[in-house]
Amino acid sequence: MRPAWIRLSQNTQILYLLFCLCHYTQAITILVPRSTITAPVQGSALFSVDITCTGTPAIRWMFSSVSRQQSIAAWMLGGSANITQMYEGRAQTHPNGSLTITDLRLQDSGYYTITVTEPSGNSKDMCMVLSVTEVLYEDIQYFIVFIIVLGTLAALLMLCMWLLNKLHNFIKAWRQQRCLPEHNETELQPL
């Protein structure tokens, strides 16, 4: 008796081989609209992804920087997420595999890697870069001081203009009074 593999025709064997290859190759696609994200301190960053794969994948987000590497969250797509203690209250997962981090700090700058693993064991990684910028309050303070100085100068100029107008009116009235004779004797003529 011949084994089942040998009994199959050559075309069927080729189709079976193609099916196995397609099944075991990576059928995972991760689309990332923006691979570089810039956000301010105390702001939020959305790591948006669009995942397509066969079956229900496992999602894992990791953070890497020069000084440390940290797991952020792991979950099965559609299930509840296991968020690490360091990111608890700041990380929010989305049903499509995306991740939002709120209350950003300068230390959050670095590489964020998503790993998608299919039930068959195939996995794929995608990396995004987050740059957290510090809002320079010094610039705002200089601007406010500049506005206050300009307002004060404008008020002083208006006060000077008002005083000069009063002085001008006083001098004008004084000159008119000085030019008039003190005793204006006018005689009335008979009609």
Image: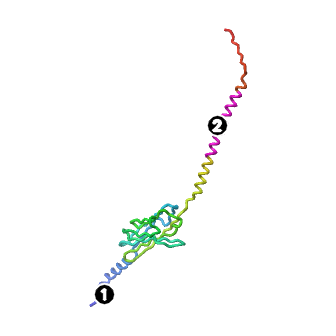
Residue 147 position in % (x across, y down):
60, 49
Q: Which mark is residue 6?
A: 1
Amino acid type at mark 2:
Trp
Q: Residue extending furthest left?
A: 1
Secondary structure under tag 1 reads helix
In the rendered structure, the answer to whether residue 4 lies left or right of residue 52 reads left
In the rendered structure, the answer to whether residue 103 lies left or right of residue 3 reads right
Against 191, residue 19 (above or below) is below
Residue 108 position in % (x across, y down):
51, 67
Secondary structure under tag 2 reads helix
Residue closer to the observer: 176 or 1: 176
* Mark 1: few/some/many CA within 10 Å (<14, 14-19, 20+): few
The residue drawn where x is 32% and y is 84% is 10
* Mark 2: few/some/many CA within 10 Å (<14, 14-19, 20+): few
The residue drawn where x is 30% and y is 87% is 6
Residue 99 position in % (x across, y down):
44, 66
Q: Give the range drawn in magenta.
A: 151-175
Residue closer to the observer: 20 or 159: 159
Q: Residue extending furthest front?
A: 85
